[in-house]
Amino acid sequence: MTKEIIKDEMGGPLVEESLLLGLAVVTISIVIAVILQATGWAQEVITGLVDMLENSWNNLNQLFVP
């Protein structure tokens, strides 16, 4: 009797589509998170470089201005 209940092992198309959509949503979320993290890191590096250049320029100006 249990073989008759478990005999149909195939899932319906709705189950397959929902699993694929769920996998796509998870994948897109991970990609977006990685991109946002990378751009945030790059923004911090650029801001640090601009601050360093600005401080260097101000120090150089102080040498020449009486």
Image: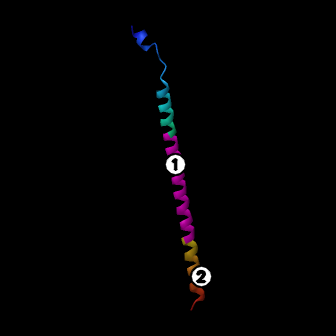
Front residue of this view, candidates 47 and 20? 20
The residue tagged 1 is 32
- Judge from the rendering whether residue 60 lies leftward or rightward of residue 3; answer left or right: right
Distance between mark 2 and mark 1 Cα atoms: 42 Å
Give above or below for 52 relative to 37: below
- Residue pictured at 50% horizontal, 36% vertical: 21
| Protein image colouring | rainbow
Q: Report the residue at 54% width, 67% height from top.
A: 48
Which amino acid, mark 2? Leu
Residue ID at (42%, 9%): 4
Give the percent coordinates (x, y) of residue 34: 53, 49
- Residue reaching furthest left? 1
Is residue 36 rendered magenta in the image?
Answer: yes
Q: Residue at x 58, y 84 (%)?
A: 61
Of pointers 2 and 1, the one earlier in the residue sequence: 1
Quarter assignment of residue 50: bottom right
Quarter placement of the N terminus: top left
**Numbered label attached to residue 60:** 2
Using the image, determine if residue 21 lies above or below residue 53. above
Q: Which residues are magenta?
A: 25-50
